[in-house]
Amino acid sequence: MTDRTPLMAGNWKMNCNHVEAAGLVQKLDWTLKDGHYDASKSECALIVPFTDIRTVQTLVEGDKIPMAYGAQDVSLYASGAYTGEISADMLAKLKCAYVVVGHSERRDYHGETDEIINAKAKVVLAAGMIPIVCCGEKLDIRKAGEQVPFVLAQVDICLAGLTAEQVASLVIAYEPVWAIGTGEVATPEDAQEVCGAIRERVAATFGAEAADKVRIQYGGSVKANNIVDIMAKPDVDGALVGGASLNADEFAKIVMFYAV
Ligand code: PEP
């Protein structure tokens, strides 16, 4: 079995201007150094607002901080008359490693469908970056016990037309919508049930090697006090963390979950 390095990605959402971003990156860096953070045991990534990316890049490169960074969304289009949009090439030029596509907030507030998310994942891959493809059910689906078929149907469309190599390289974030920003965390067993089913579906569609290599994150009210149990599950390869990633001490504990 491939040794999948867990990915702990902090999604800052629409928080932190570029001055605040610099402070948070530096505090996180000191805190991780203090804790003797070992990047071979868990990868740390910051998914920041567009206006923070250049600042984060300057700090990460200048101070040789062992952190990746990326964006929360991308345009479907390469360039031109798309006011307000940011292209994949613009993000790649800023050395973004990751781009989140299909976060539930984009689905809810901007009408993004699985088909759009599939197209965005392709745009991100074509620009040499790694998409973090989000999926997850709402509470009514969970209450009906339909979470596995619902999420697998999302995954089928979001990954349609990709090669096995592309799927092996990307990240899928399973984020039950009812657990995002609510304090309502899925149990480790809930997370494993769906993450395991996603890996099986990837194996069936793209082959055993892609399934073995693809990283599948859990997201939804992850905190320092619940990450260890979630990470103990075999098909959970990290976390997409919202609120808790805005606090350097809390996020550092999540990134260094392996040390507990
Ligand atoms: C998220 O933004 O993807 C998320 C999971 O948020 P939170 O950790 O705040 O629930």
Image: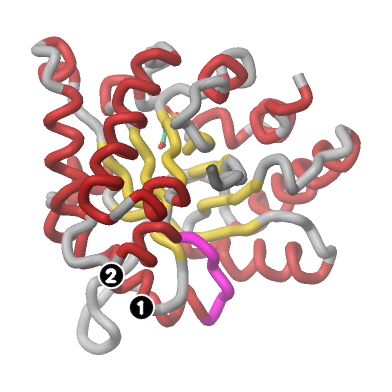
Above or below 13: residue 235 = above
Q: CA distance from mark 1 to mark 2?
A: 6 Å
Image spot of residue 51 (x, y percent)? 51, 64
The picture places residue 253, in percent across and down from the top left corner, at 71, 27
* In the image: residue 7, left or right of residue 172: right
Instruction: Report the amino acid beneath label 2.
Output: Lys
In this view of the protein, which residue sits in the foreground, 174 or 34? 174
Type of residue at label 1? Ala
Identify the residue at image location x=62%, y=13%: 225
Where is mark 1, residue-wise?
126
Question: Where does the image place residue 227, in percent across and percent down from the top left?
Answer: 58, 21
Can residue 99 be seen here? The reply is: no
Classified by dominant secondary structure, the portion drawn in magenta counts as loop
**Residue 72 vs residue 70: left or right?**
left
Residue 215 drawn in magenta: no
Circle 2 Cα neighbour tier, 10 Å, few/some/many (<14 / 14–19 / ≥20): many
Q: Is residue 5 above or below residue 162?
A: above
Q: Which residues are magenta?
A: 93-98
Q: Which residue is mark 2?
A: 122
Residue drawn at (49%, 77%), measured in percent from left and top? 92
Residue contact at pointers 1 and 2, CB within 8 angstroms: yes
